[in-house]
Amino acid sequence: MESNPVLLESKSSPINLLNEMQQLRLLGHLCDVTVSVEYQGVRAEFPAHKAVLAATSKFFKEVFLNEEPVDGPRSNVFLNEVRVADFASFLEFVYTARVEVEEDRVQRMLEIAEKLKCLDLSETCFQLKRQMLESVLLELQNFSESQNSEEESAARPGAVPAAKAERDPPDCSVAEPGHGASPEGPAAKSKEKV
């Protein structure tokens, strides 16, 4: 008798794999490529794994698939006009699927993602930029609405805002008949008490 197939799937395996690859990179183990970046005279070298770079970046995939076989243990890739900090953030993202950058660097991260053809980073930057833009638009809308309400109340100096008028009924010295008050009003009551 044949049994039905079952699916064995690990939710933690992709995260564990990324974490382990990041640790190997940070320790320099099993790295088979060195990426040299230079921007305005500032230069740095980053050891990495071809498989990780090729899997996350179409640029690196094309470079590695088209390179000549290397006799030594490591090949080298040179990137000009890439800031050291931006490439370090790029590497952290491709090895961990997350990176923390300052808001003003998001555009630069998008540019490096497009240059290196890294779709995941590009989409992440677009989503963050959209959220930032929506936040700014909401703040502008709130500011505009508050300015409009201030201008309206300034245009009618004696007018009481509608919301305040509903909460605080006008103070009148004569109560309306039929509402449980004497027609004489509050002044007559204070005389009776004395």
Image: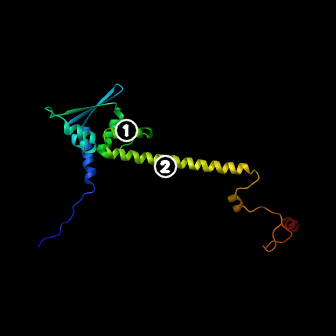
How far across and down, in percent of the image, does residue 156 sit?
74, 51
Vertically, is 76 above or below 190? above
Residue at figure coordinates x 81%, y 71% from the top left = 181
Q: Residue furthest left?
A: 1
Query: Circle 1 sits in a helix, a strand or a loop, which is it?
Result: helix
Disc sitting over residue 111 in the figure: 1
Regarding residue 103, the answer to whether it shows in the image is yes
Vertically, is 112 above or below 155? above
Q: Residues within 10 Å of mark 2 (few under 14, many from 20)?
A: few
Dots 1 and 2: beta carbons under 8 Å?
A: no
How far across and down, in percent of the image, does residue 109 sit?
38, 39
> Marks 1/2: CA distance?
21 Å
Query: Circle 2 sits in a helix, a strand or a loop, which is it?
Result: helix
Q: Which residue is mark 2?
A: 134
Residue at figure coordinates x 88%, y 66% from the top left = 191
Which is nearer the eye, 45 or 64?
64
Vertically, is 47 above or below 156? above
Q: Amino acid at mark 2?
A: Glu
Q: Amino acid at mark 1?
A: Glu
Instruction: Please indicate whether residue 69 sits to the left or right of residue 172 in the image.
Output: left
Which is nearer the eye, 193 or 121?
121
How far across and down, in percent of the image, does residue 119 sit?
32, 45
Residue at figure coordinates x 30%, y 30% from the top left = 44
